[in-house]
Image (cartoon, rainbow, N blue to C red):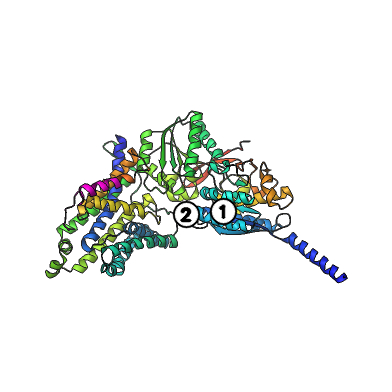
Amino acid sequence: MSNLFDLLVAGLATGAIYALVAVGFTLLWQTSQTINFAQGEFVMLPAFLMLAAMHAGAPFWLAIILGILLSMLLLGLAFKMLLVDPMMRHGVLPLAIATMALAIGLKEAVKQFFSAEASPFPSIVPTGDISILGHAVSLQSIGVLAVAIVAVFGLTALLNRTSLGHQMQAAAQNPTVARIIGVPVERMILLTFLINAFLVALASLLITPIYLAKFSSGEVLGQAAFIAAIVGGFNQVRGAIAGGLLIGVLDNLAAAYVSTQYRAAVPMIFLIAVILFRPQGLLGRAEERTV
Amino acid sequence: MRSTLLAGALLAFATATSVHAQAIKLADVAELSGGGATVGTNWKNGIDLAIEEINAKGGVLGRKLEVTHADSQSNPGVARAQVQKALDAEPYVLLGPGYSGSVKVTAPLAAEAGIAQIMGGEAAELTQAGNKFLFRTSFGQQSSMPKVAKYIHDEMKAKTVAVVWVNNDFGRGGRDVVVKELDRLGSKVVADLSTEAGQADFAADVGKIKAANPDAVFVYLNEEESARILKELKRQGVTAPLMGETTLIGQKVIELAGDAANGARGHVGLTTDAPVDLIKSFRDKFAKKYNYVPDHNGLKGYLAVYMVKATTEKMGKVDSKAFADTLHGLTIKAADEPGILMDVTFSDTGDIDRQSFLVEVVEGKQVVKQVLPKVK
C-alpha cells in the first residue's frame, strides 16, 4: 500500500509535467492547427539555454529568467514566424512534417554545440522529505506538482477570467467573427505560441534535474505529451491536464506492476482504446474547438 | 663490376638501416565521437601519452612506436569497417575498441588476420569465445563480479539484496554472474529488476526496491542511468547501502548525481585515485599533458601500449604472429616495467589477474577503502 502511494505521488509529479507540455500542444492546435512534433525537443532546449547562461557566469535565478525569455523568443516568436507561418499555407501535413525536421535539427544542434553526453542540472526544489498521511514524500515531487498546478490554474484563469483570455478563445473558435468584432486574431495566435514556449520552458526546468540535460531527453516527453493530449481530448485544456496526469500515473503503475520492458506499451494500448471507443478523448467534445 | 658490387653493398646497408629504424606501427580504433566519446578520448590520450614516453626513452628494441587513431563513432558497424581498414594496413597490434559491443563484432576480424587485439571491453562473453588473439586491459565480469558478491555478503553482511541491471549484453552478463555468486554465498536476491538503456524515469524501479526492503542494493547500469537512479533512490529515501562497479561510482556519475552519489560503493579494477605511487605519477603526467584528470579508460589505453612494450621485449623481436602466444600466461611486474603500473598476469583466454580496489564516494570524491589482492 505504501508502495502504491509512492507510485501515485511519483506518477502525478511526472504526469503534471506531461500535462504542461500537453496543454501547449492543444493550445497550438486550437489557435493555429499546428501539430508540433518538436514539442519534446522544445522541452529539452530551454535546459541547455539555462546551462549556457550559467556557463557564461549567470547565477541560477538569472539563468532561469534568461532561459525562459530566450525560449519565448526562439520557440515562440521565431518558431511561428520562420516555420509555422510560411508552412501553414501548404496545409497541416507539410507543417507537421516540418516540425519533425525541426525536432531532428534541434537534437543534432544541441549534440553538436553542447555535447552528446548528459549534463547535471540544478533543482529549484530542495531535496528532503515531508510526511503526508504518515508517508514520507519527497519535497521534489511536491514541488514539481505544486509548480505545475499553479501554472495550469494560472493559465485556466487567464483563459476564462480575463478579457485577453476571452479574446484568445474567440480567435480560436471563430477567427472570422472575432476579427469582425475587433479581436486582434494574429496577436492572439502569437500569444498562444509565447504561452506554449513559457510552458515548455517551465516543464524543462522541472523535469531536467530528474532526467538530466541530454539532447535526446525530449523524445520520451514529446511522445508522452502527445499521447496525453489525445487521450484527454485534443480540443480541451482540461483534457490535456487530465491526460497528462493519467499517463504519468499509468506509466509508473505499468512499470511497477506489468514490466519495465513493456511500460511504454501500456499508454500506447490505452491510446488505441481511447481512439477506438472515444475518439474525441476522455474530456474532449466532438467537433468543437475551444481553448 | 667493382662499382656495381659497391652500389649493391651500399643498397643492402641502406635497406638494413631503414628496416632497423622503421617504426613499429600500432592501429587504434576507439569511440572518439558519439555516446562513448568520453571512453574513447580517454583511451586515445592514454595511448598517446604512453607512446610519447616510450619513444622519448628510445622506443621498443630501438624502434619507435607509431599509432594511427580511427573513430568508431561509438557504433559497432562503423567500428567493424574501421578495424578492417586498420588491419589492411597490417599493424603490429590492434588497440581498441572500448565498447564491448564493438569488440564483439571486430574480434573475429583481428583473429582471422592473426593480429593481437588489446581492448577495453568488459563483457564476460568476450574472452569466452575461444579467441586466441584478444586481450583485456581491465577485469572481465567473471573476474570482478565474484569480488563484488563476496563484498556484499562478507563486508556488508547483506542477507537480502536487490539487483538492478540494464537490459543489454553488458548488464545481463554482470547480472548473471553476480546473482549466481550471491546465491552460492547464501545472500538472497529479493528483487531482480531489469531496466532499459537510456531509461529516464526510475521512480517505479526504486518503488519496487523500497517495497522489497533489502539489506543492500546492487546497481549495474550505464553511467547516465546510474546517476538517475542514484537521484531517485535519494528522492524516495532508500537508505540501504548501494554497491556497484566502476559505472556506479565513476567521476561522470558523481558529477551528474551530485550529493546523491555520496555513500555509494563500488568495486573498481582501475582508478586514478588508487593508493599506488606509479598510478599517482601517471595521473599527474596525464593531467599535466591534457589538463584534466583521466578516468579508468585513460589508464586502460596507457596500459595497452605498455603491454605491447613488455611483450615485445620479452620476445626480443618484433613478431606480430608470435605476440599473442607470448602474452598468454605472461606475468609482467611493475618493478621490471613501471609503465604497467601494477603486477599483472594474463590467462590463456586473455583475461587479467591484478589487484583491485573497493571505492566509496565521500563528499563527491572517490575514496579507496580497501585494496583487494590478486586472486593468484
On screen, residue A249 versus residue B325, left or right, reads left
* Rendered residue at 49%/49% (across/down): B251
- What residue did someone put label 2 on? B35
* SS of the residue under disc 2: loop
On screen, residue B294 versus residue A153, left or right, reads right
* SS of the residue under disc 1: helix
Point out residue A199 in the picture as x, y percentages from the top left corner.
28, 57
Residue B287: quarter of image: bottom right
Point out residue A25 in the picture as x, y percentages from the top left corner.
26, 57
Type of the residue with mark 2: Gly
Residue B105 appearing in the image = yes
On screen, residue A136 versus residue A281, left or right, reads right
Residue closest to the eye, A21 or B320: B320
Q: CA distance from mark 1 to mark 2?
A: 14 Å
Q: Is residue B325 above or below residue A192?
A: above
Q: Which residues are magenta?
A: A268-291
Chain to which mark 2 belongs: B
- What residue did someone put label 1 on? B43
Chain to which mark 1 belongs: B
Whether residue A278 appears in magenta in the rendering, the answer is yes
Residue at the top extreme of this rendering: B186
* Rendered residue at 38%/37% (across/down): B209
Camera-side mark, 1 or 2: 2
Q: Is residue B1 above or below residue A61?
A: below
